């Protein structure tokens, strides 16, 4: 998992080197959240497992893996080296005039290809609910002590971590709101903002423990997170259905620059409501998986 994190960091730096700050921010945020979830999942596995494959079967599996990986690499090379007519110019030229935003990446995700994004957040929500269904009622039976004879403890959160978590939470929420609202014109958006919020909430779980953190969040054993997952696609879907009232196709967005007292002229787009659905889904799915994995490991002693 450490090596996977290193690969993710190098990938984020590569995105940054190619002037793709949106992808770099997303990659870094995904690495933090996925590392925490992977560590929690690994903690549920037994320390040792029986031998399940013979040397012949392992060699066969290795050959199949090499053949599959080599085949995908060959197909990728063919796709990347063939002559093609890029349509990137269309998005760059029309992101402002037809999408109302200067950040072409976000405009593509929530406007030009909003239907794809709608399907992706639906799949994300289904995956999180699937984790809950798989782990419902599952409990890990661990020995009373670890390999060094030390007793297991789930209540020994360091004081410095608790203090840091209290400070980071409001700052992270403000940063996520800022990243969310700037996403249509500058690097950011609902997906990145949702991951930033999730990281702050994951830190609360780490610092306070699951029971106390869920009590403060009023998670009701994770049931609140399932409602968030349902609300996210619902908000995005209702945004798309709103276009029907104006005789436009599903998920057609509108934008304008109304003048507001004190604030002046504001660039607003209905795609922000769609992005809000993305934000809610990302936070709900992440927290539901975290809650399900944490609940499975609560019974630490045999």
Image (cartoon, grey):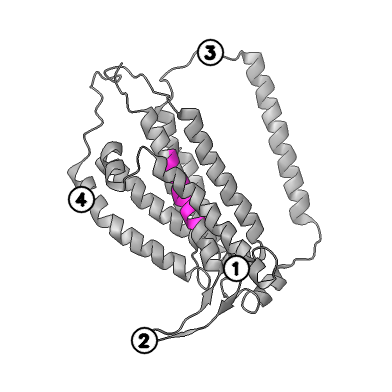
Relative height, residue 249 to residue 139 (above, below): below
Closer to viewer: mark 1 or mark 2: 2
Residue marked by disc 1 = 107
Residue lying at 47% horizontally and 81% vertically, measured from the top left: 266
- Could you tell me if the residues under marks 3 and 1 are in contact, i.e. CB atoms within 8 Å? no
Question: Disc 1 or 2, which lies upstream in sequence?
Answer: 1
Whether residue 74 sits left or right of residue 1 in the image: it is right
> Which is more foreground, mark 2 or mark 3?
2
CA gap, disc 3 and disc 4: 45 Å
Q: Is residue 41 above or below residue 284?
A: above
Density class for disc 1 (Cα within 10 Å; few <14, some 14-19, many ≥20) is many
Asked if marks 3 and 4 touch (Cβ < 8 Å), the reply is no
Q: Is residue 199 above or below residue 245?
A: above
Disc 3 vs disc 1: which is toward the camera?
A: 1
Q: Quadrant of residue 179?
A: bottom left
Could you tell me how far apart the alpha carbons at marks 4 and 1 are, in whole angstroms? 38 Å
Per the image, the residue denoted by label 2 is 262
For residue 289, which quarter of the picture?
top left
- Most common secondary structure along the magenta stretch: helix
Q: Residue shown at 49%/61% (left/top)?
A: 276
């Amino acid at each position: 998992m450490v090596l996977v994190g290193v690969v993710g960091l190098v990938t984020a730096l590569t995105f940054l080197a190619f002037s793709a700050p949106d992808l770099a921010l997303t990659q870094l945020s995904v690495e933090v959240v996925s590392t925490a979830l992977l560590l929690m999942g690994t903690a549920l596995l037994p320390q040792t497992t029986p031998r399940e494959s013979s040397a012949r079967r392992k060699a066969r599996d290795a050959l199949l893996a090499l053949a599959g990986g080599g085949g995908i690499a060959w197909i990728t090379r063919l796709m990347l080296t063939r002559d093609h007519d890029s349509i990137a110019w269309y998005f760059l030229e029309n992101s402002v005039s037809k999408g109302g935003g200067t950040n072409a990446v976000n405009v593509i995700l929530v406007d030009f290809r909003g239907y794809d994004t709608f399907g992706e957040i639906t799949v994300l929500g289904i995956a999180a609910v699937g984790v809950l269904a798989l782990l419902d009622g599952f409990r890990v039976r661990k020995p009373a002590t670890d390999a060094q004879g030390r007793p297991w403890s789930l209540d020994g959160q360091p004081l410095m971590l608790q203090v840091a978590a209290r400070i980071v939470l409001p700052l992270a929420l403000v940063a996520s709101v800022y990243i969310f609202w700037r996403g249509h014109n500058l690097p950011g958006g609902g997906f990145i903002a949702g991951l930033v919020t999730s990281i702050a909430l994951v830190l609360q779980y780490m610092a306070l423990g699951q029971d106390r953190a869920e009590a403060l969040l009023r998670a009701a054993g994770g049931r609140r997170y399932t409602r968030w997952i349902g609300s996210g696609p619902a908000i995005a879907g209702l945004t798309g259905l709103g276009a029907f009232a104006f005789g436009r196709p599903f998920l057609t967005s509108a934008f304008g620059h109304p003048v507001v007292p004190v604030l002046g002229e504001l660039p607003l787009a209905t795609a922000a409501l769609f992005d809000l659905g993305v934000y809610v889904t990302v936070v709900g799915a992440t927290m539901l998986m975290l809650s399900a994995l944490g609940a499975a490991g609560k019974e630490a002693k045999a």
